[in-house]
Amino acid sequence: MAKSNSSRIDDTIKFIRTTAAADTISDAHRSVLADELINWKLHLSPGQIDTIGGFLAQGNAGHRAGTRRDRNYVRASILLNCAFILQSAAWAGFATGQKAVPGNYENLYKWALAPARDRVMTKSNRIVRVLGDLVADPVGFLREQQVTIRCAGDANPENAAESIGTFTPYFEDGTLKFADRRPPDYATVTMSAIGVYTTDYGTQVRSADGGVNAITGVDTSLGADCGFLFTTQFTGCGFCFERTGDGSRMLCAHVDPGGRGSAYSAQDVRAAMVGVDGGAGGSFSNSIGADFNCYGKVPVGTSDITSPDFGYPQNCGQMTIIGIRDGVQWKLYAQVLHNDLTTLTAARIDG
């Protein structure tokens, strides 16, 4: 007896829930996709169920896969793309194309899983839950979930309108991202956050006599309604900050050596701002009277993200800093992606 279109969809959802694909998404995320597919199907009309179930049928396939498992891979790719990735106008052509592929059927499934996961995890109800998990346990979250930030604006630390940005949280390739520019079209949630934009070491910090000019820090008191502080990625920069004893206020600056071709290195920046070898060290022109700190790049082996040399290892793949307001307290967290581009470590760095 031929399957009904409805049962064909149900069987494909079960296949997605129970079938892993190497080097793709986690079992937990596949389960999320299956749950979302069940909910999606509940909102389809009978006519839509017949149409989509018909797409999954492979009797008329250009290259019908020879095994049941391979046919299931094809069906899963079609269903994931119809539910989460493609506009409805593209469904029929996509399904025909997938059923004409002559082999490598598991790859069709793999290629659908990651973008489907990204879109589902970026849905408003789920991304809000993710942000709640980040706030509830920042260190635990950052040890498990890679985060990157695109903070591309130009800020005037003394002007609240220019140091508070609109950021969009979303998942891309499994990474949680926050961007103040050009998010993907599937990301719909926005949030106001304090943006700490880059200050160039060579032109804005280093003085003509080789010393260090006082810099203006972004003041968290400008963002009374913000719960997050973001700054762009670190590959050699130093993050400078002052924090009051009760944590109610911080000053922050992101000091950049100047990129490739610069006369200054990450080590130059950290040394100047920390004040090694008798140097005066960095300071804020708008100081709030707290200790000045610089979390910069340090030699490999001297630090595993925090003490004894306050900073991140110079051979790491990426470092991210996030500020989170916990009630009235601002707290700073660093996440290091190590040079194997897999291992994550995280720690609170403000004290």
Image (cartoon, helix red, strand yellow):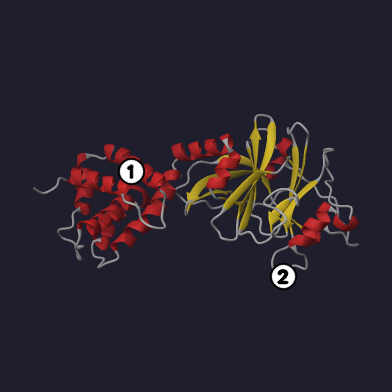
Q: Is residue 181 left or right of residue 24?
A: right
Sort mark 1 into few (<14), some (14-19) or many (20+) by Cα contacts within 10 Å: many
306 w.r.t. 300: above or below: above
Q: Residue furthest top?
A: 327
Residue carrying label 1: 34
Three-letter residue code for mark 1:
Ala
Mark 2: secondary structure:
loop
Three-letter residue code for mark 2:
Gly
Residue 132: horizontal and vertical position, in percent?
A: 53, 35
Q: Is residue 241 left or right of residue 68?
A: right
Q: Is residue 32 left or right of residue 213?
A: left
Query: Comparing marks 2 and 1, which lies closer to the viewer?
Result: 1
The structure residue drawn at horizontal position 89% and vertical position 55%, both measured from the top left corner, is 279
Is residue 146 visible from the viewing direction of this image? yes
Mark 1: secondary structure:
helix
Residue 53: horizontal and vertical position, in percent?
A: 21, 48
How far apart are labels 2 and 1 at the CA level?
49 Å
The structure residue drawn at horizontal position 73% and vertical position 57%, both measured from the top left corner, is 298
Circle number at residue 261? 2
Q: Is residue 102 left or right of residue 343?
A: left
Q: Earlier in the sequence, mark 2 or mark 1?
A: 1
In front of the other: 160 or 170: 170
> Which picture quadrant has residue 268?
bottom right
The structure residue drawn at horizontal position 23% and vertical position 65%, both measured from the top left corner, is 100
Is residue 152 visible from the viewing direction of this image? no
